[in-house]
Image (cartoon, helix red, strand yellow):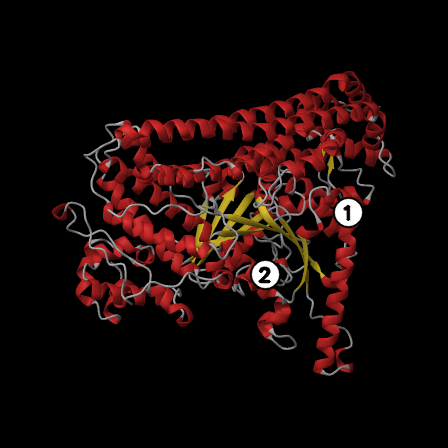
Amino acid sequence: MDDFVRNKLTEWGLSEYIQKFKDEGIDEESFYCLDFQDIANLIPKVGRRAIFKKRFRLLKGEENTSYQESVDSPPQVLPSTSVTKDKGKRKLDLQCESGKWPSPPSKRQHASGLGSFTEEIILSDVKSIMRFVQQRLPNQDSNFNRFLWNKISNLETDKRVLVGVFGKTGAGKSSLINAVIGEKNLLPSGSISACTSVMIKVEANMKSPKYEADIEFITKEEWKDELWSLLNFVGDNADQRNDQEEEEDYRDIDEKLSVVYGEEWRNKSPEDLMDNKYFKEIPEFLQSKRKILTCESAKELSAKCVKYTKNDSKDGDGKDRKRWYWPLVKCVTVRVPKNRLLQHVTIVDLPGTGDRNKSRDEMWKSVVGSCSTVWIVTELNRAAAEKETWEILKSASSIMGNGGECQQIHFICTKSDYVEDLDDHSAAGVRALIFKKNMRAKEEVNKEFKKLNKVKKHFSDECFKVFTVSSREFFKKKRLEPDETEIPKLQEFLQDLNDCHSETLNYVAGAYGILSLIEGARSRNVAGNTAGVCKDLEEKLSHELEKVKRPMEEAYMTFDKCLSEGVENSESSCDKVLKSILQPRGVKGSAAHKTLKCVVENGGIHKPKNKKPINFNVKLAACLTDSIDEEFKKTFPNERKCGAFNGVINTFSLDMEGLIQKYKDVELQLIFLKTEEEKIKTVLNKTIREYKKTIYKSLTTTIEENMQDCYQQAAGFRGKDSLKNMRDTIKQHVYSLKNTMFEQAKDVMLGQLRDLKVFILKELKETMQKSIELSLKTDDYSLPDFAVELAEVKKHFNYLKESQEEETPQICFAQWGEAADA
């Protein structure tokens, strides 16, 4: 035990429990991790426990007088320490400390977070109940017991939503993120330039009251390969830096190597530069481990993180270089304590177009494809005309849209409070000018978005929203009120993403189903009546599987037709595509040679500094992807409410409500089967979201695989005529494969669609058949009596179900029959 815990217990008048906390090894970090079951075990007396819980909530910043009643009201029944003496039954105290049950939170309350803490208490309580149930289950000596054990273990899910943030250096990304999450000093901003390679994730620290940074390095092998590439470029172009692009590339390499090695990198081999002496400050890099930084404040952590995330490696007065390590870093995860906006949300500060390093680039694509929302950040005074910002959106749209799961794009115009000639206006006049300018910016940005035809193949106008924000005014409040900065709108959006309602409802519903099954198995004397319900269920299952199968087969046929047209267009446009790739307009001589050389050395991909990325594979596959984009968006919409294949998974139902009315004596088992039905639908919808990314990407992946031998051959040319030889090699290779390569890409994609159909039907059938078998054809009178737990979880479930009626349902249980009270 440390002084923090001792002092808190003394301050709260609970010093008699100091020894108990000491015996259990509770220090400051584990103190913040205590859940309701832990508290019950440490403080068995209800009155003293109530005082601790109240003080504990206040300490964690989770209590607010405006919803005090909701916090204190829900049931919080915990396992008794004398469970074995009482045959597993616990005293049911459904009125809790205040003596009444809260009204379900309204939609407005959920949006503002007023109902969310009540649900956290419910979720914590039900998790405690299910841990207690799992501990008391007999040994896993039967299929049924193993089934129950696994079902309880699988209730646990971690909701994590990604919000990706794009924007060029100086656009105000760091200030925006700091303002939105309420941490003014977390991410450094100002004169130090953001590194174009390092990805920064910001999330909540739910395990400790400290600020933490988790630094993930690229591997030693990846850095050695990168050194080889960088040093080769420097050697090949030592006397040939004739154009601006080559000069910029050289400066980029010089900076990257100099921040790590100082001037020592010059005239040394990659092997020399891998010597351990250069990495003494970061032994984690050599050991392939992560480096963890822990601090008391955001400002302290920010100062420690700079050398891993920023690229200004000079002292404040421009003197000697320090050793900074951002070129070796793949990702930095910053964790903020007790930040409720980030509890289920991760904000990711993303590089604009990936990275030349393969490992960082693959992580970039994975994260971009997993973002549910993307924020595009740029300065307001040039928002509509900022080419670099719009290029980021265009280049990433397919990864975010059909190739990802992005539902919304927020175009955020920063520094909205800036107005010229402020001396000529009153305070009211200045505000009026700011509002007028902001409205005009929104109109111009929306007009610009409507011109992006390729982006709109992935995103509709409804997915695109424009915000005009001022992080400075949000903190200083000189000319604008906080609401007028639009920062609170973004905070409200994060709160909605962070809302744990669906997580709580999924868990509680699953727990309700499992406890219903246990009680049904214990008390059932309906052996003669199961044949009828099993027959009805099997017939309904067969019928519903056919309903699921039909739209998937229709989608397959549609994609077959679209891809056939894509193959034909790909073959007929080969000459045009090759010309645009091998002889791009305005690029000649050494510049053309250098660009093509970089492309073939990197598997068909080149990411020049401050220019559009080049991807031969994407260009060759363009006719194929264009042919299916519109249909793909309809078949696999990113909007959760729609669902894939015209929502066929969401409508799958064995009509448990009707069966409950017909077979009242197996009501508990049917309640369990309903929760199983909803669980498998949730799992399948999530699986489809992931699988569709692979399906969409398969067209380009197949082309890329077919082109690799060609790229390797072209990369080997040196000296005179090497540009011509590279071009001829690529042309000949494409011509020789054009009658098979595009057809193969089509076949691969259709094969994956077919595999997805088989997987969905198999999972639905086997999961429901197994659940039916175990729930209706198994009895086990040796199971403990969990009637009290069932009654308590049922009340929790009914409360959540009632509150859900105010919102769009995540899980729709319709009107169930009432389970028999044990």
- In front here: 436 or 380? 436
Give the vertical position of 196 relative to 563 (above or below): below
- In front here: 731 or 647? 647
Q: Where residue 791 appears, x then y in whole percent?
A: 28, 50
Residue 72's image quarter? bottom left
Give the vertical position of 516 relative to 529 (above or below): below
**Mark toward the start of the polypeptide (1 vs 2):** 1
Placement of the N terminus among the 4 image quadrants: bottom left
Q: Where residue 330 appears, x then y in whole percent?
A: 55, 43
**What residue sits right under mark 1 in the picture?**
452
Which residue is found at the position 39% from the left and 37% from the top? 659
Q: Amino acid at mark 1?
A: Leu
Q: Amino acid at mark 2?
A: Leu
Q: Where residue 607 appears, x then y in whole percent?
A: 71, 39
| Residue 129 shown left or right of residue 332 in the figure | left
| Residue 376 shown left or right of residue 801 in the figure | right
Give the vertical position of 611 relative to 498 (above or below): above
Q: Where residue 723 appears, x then y in whole percent?
A: 82, 27
Badge 1, how many Cα within 10 Å: few under 14, some, many 20+? Answer: few
Marks 1 and 2, how far apart at CA: 25 Å
Numbered-mark total: 2
- Asked if residue 720 shows in the view, the reply is no
Badge 2, how many Cα within 10 Å: few under 14, some, many 20+? Answer: some
Tell me the tag on residue 792: none
- In front here: 123 or 748? 123
| Residue 750 shown left or right of residue 293 in the figure | right
| Residue 298 shown left or right of residue 245 in the figure | left
Extreme residue toward the left, this view: 85
- Asked if residue 97 shows in the view, the reply is yes
**What residue sits right under mark 2 in the picture?**
490
Extreme residue toward the front, this view: 662
